[in-house]
Amino acid sequence: MLNELAYAGRENLDAAHVARYDHKEDGDAAGEVAALVAMGLGPDATVVDLGAGTGQFVLAAASIARRVVAVDVSPVMLEHLRAKLERDGVGNVVCVQAGFLTYNHAGPPADVVYSRYALHHLPDFWKVLALARIAAMLRPGGILRLSDVVYSFDPSDTAAGLERWMTGTASGSKDQGWTRAELEEHVQDEHSTFTWLLEPMISKAGFVIEQADYSDDRICARYICVNTNQT
C-alpha cells in the first residue's frame, strides 16, 4: 500500500505552513456548502471531507449536516483543525487521521464526499483506487464534490500553460499566497494530471460527471459527480 503520509507534500507537515494556510488559500467554503444545499444537502446528511486540511469546509458543513467526518493524513493539519473545533464548540465533527486509501468509513453511507486540492497527492494508479473507495462509502446517488489542480490544456501547450500559471498566480509572499517556488514544487513533486486522464478514472469508479468547470488558466477543475453504484 502506498505510504500516503510520505506523499502528503512537505508543506502539509510543516506547522508554520499550516498556521498560515487560511491566509494563503480561501476555499469559499460557504459557497461550496450553499451549492451542495441546493443539491439536497440537509440536516440529516453525513459528509466526509477527504483531505480536510485546516477545516474551512468542515466548519461550514458542520453548521448544516448531522455528521461530518474530517479525514486527513497530516497530524499537523488535524491538530490545527481540532483546535478550531474546540474553539468554536463544534460537536458533530469526527477527526480521523487517514488518507484516501486507508480511511474506513463506518456508520450510514455518506451523502456527500468532498475533496479539495488533495487527490493530486496520489499517482494516477492510486487515484483510481481512491475514487473506487469513495464510491463505496457513498450511498447510491450520493455526491462527490471534487476540486483539484487538473490540467485542461493540451500536452503540447504544457510549457506555455505552466508559465501562464506561474506568472498569473504567483505571489511575492508565502504568507499571503503561493510563491513561484511553491507552484514549481507542486509541478515537480506532486501528481496533478490532465483532465482527459482524470475524467475517465472518475467514470470508471462508477460516477457520472454532472458538472465540470475549468479555470480560465486551464490549471484547475471542479466536478460534481453522482454515484451510480447500487451497493
Image: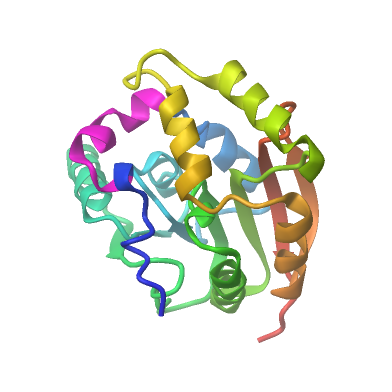
State the residue at coordinates (59%, 72%): 125
Q: Which range is magenta?
A: 12-24
Say if residue 11 shows up in the picture: yes
The reply to whether residue 154 is visible in this rendering is no
Q: Position of residue 181 (x, y in %)?
A: 42, 28
Residue 101 lies left or right of residue 37; in this view the side is left
Q: Residue 133 versus residue 181: which sits nearer the camera? A: 181
Q: Which corner quadrant of the image does residue 173 belong to?
A: top left
- What residue sits 28% from the left and 64% below the top? 97
Toward the bottom, the furthest residue is 231
Q: Tell me the quadrant of the picture where the C terminus can be found.
A: bottom right
| 1 relative position to 209: left or right | left
In magenta segment, residue 223: no
Q: Is residue 13 magenta?
A: yes
Q: Residue furthest top?
A: 172
Q: x, y (%) of residue 106?
A: 40, 79
Give the image location of residue 131, x and y in percent.
60, 69
Residue 155 versus residue 65: which sits nearer the camera? 155
